[in-house]
Image (cartoon, helix red, strand yellow):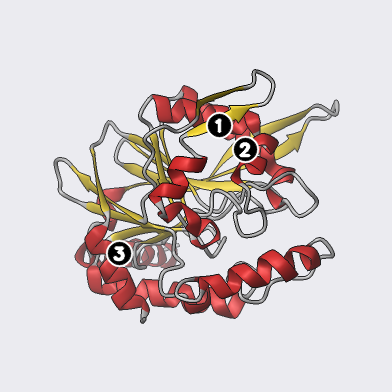
Amino acid sequence: MRTRARLDSVFERAFPVPFDDNSKFVFFGDVHRGDDSLSDEFGRNRHIYYHALNYYYQNDFTYVEVGDGDELWEHPHYEHIRSAHVSVFELLKGFHKSNRLLMLFGNHNMQLRDPKYVKENLYHIYDEYLDLKEDLFPGLYVHEALLMKHRNSGQEVFVVHGHQGDLINDQLWRVSYILIRYIWKFLHVMGVKYAASPAKNRTKRHKIEKSYNKWNEQRDIMIICGHTHRPKFPSAGETSYFNTGCCIHPRGITCLELMYGKIMLVSWNMHSKRDGTVYIKRTLVKGPEPIASFASNEKRKEAVKKQANVKKAYHIFRSLF
């Protein structure tokens, strides 16, 4: 199925989420929580992620997981992932209890599209120390996509993982699952890259981004994705395609914040002071920009024209001196 038809279908079924200029959302994609074994790439950033997650919890953000939150291809037993990252799941549990958790499935946790699987594995957990079953995410429904709509302006933001239309990771995802689960998982430990992943294949990544930009131009809507692992914040005149980046990069994690009607790309990294003290720092990479400036092609054209006029005025000013 072509990307356009696939996205059109998902767009029509997207779960509606109203918001306004007082709302605060954080979008994390491709966390890839594993079982804390050698092949768990999330392990090196788990402290950074926990610190960032706690920051957003304490500051009343709604947490949106844009797919691939759990690495269920390499580590198919959900209880092993939960046990490996107890503190992280306790925070996510807090978001869910306060009705501030929205979760999407991606290609690496496609199992979550099955409500029965979600009920059996995510509603409750077994505490080995207390020897009892307790709540984790009771009543959770994992969506394929969200359609956020501003209560006043009516502006829409489409949120989807981004594997839709990527043949080997969408329609043929079971083939990829078998290859990763039984072959590449063991090669991964030795540093072998999986060629079918857009995160490891630049040509494939650009092809996916090009397809999504083309769809975005036709729909004329803001879109937030993950999947490629490459953070993206469009400049003036570009299509409104945003990407969260990922949480398994060697140098830290990235995410998108949408708060008070503005959107920004943020990174969280480890830093050190002169005395050797290590700390985690939140860095604004790009933005904040009002989402209204990404509302339509016409407004983007106006932004480009305004930018061109500023440059023209600058060169005229320089020529006078």
Q: Closest to the observer: 24 or 98?
A: 98
Observer-nearest of 100 and 287: 100
Q: Which residue is mark 1?
A: 125
- 292 sits to left or right of 154: right
Q: Please state which amino acid type lies under the numbered disc 1.
A: Ile
| Image quadrant assignment for residue 44 | top right
Decide: marks 1, 2 in contact (CB < 8 A)?
yes
Circle 2 — which element?
Answer: helix
Whether residue 317 is situated above or below residue 93 in the rendered picture: below
Q: Which residue is mark 2?
A: 82
Q: Residue at x 44, y 29 (%)?
A: 95
Of circles 1 and 3, the one toward us is 1
Q: Quadrant of the N terminus?
A: bottom left
The residue sitting at 46% across, 71% down in the picture is: 170
Residue 216 visible, this orientation: no
Q: CA distance from mark 1 to mark 3?
A: 31 Å
Q: Which tag is nearer the camera, tag 2 or tag 3?
A: 2
Instruction: Give whichever of discs 2 and 3 has the lower sequence position.
Output: 3
Mark 2–mark 3 CB contact (< 8 Å)? no
Q: Nearer the viewer, residue 201 or 290?
A: 201
Q: Position of residue 288 (x, y in %)?
A: 41, 44
**Few, some or many residues within 10 Å of mark 2 (<14, 14–19, 20+):** many
Q: What residue lies at 32% left-to-right and 69% top-to-bottom?
A: 7
Mark number, residue 107: none
Q: Earlier along the polypeptide chain: callout 1 or callout 2? A: 2
> With respect to residue 188, does 272 lie above or below?
above
| Image location (x, y in percent) of residue 48 | 66, 37
Alpha carbon of mark 2 to alpha carbon of mark 3: how far? 29 Å
Disc 3 residue type (three-letter) = Val
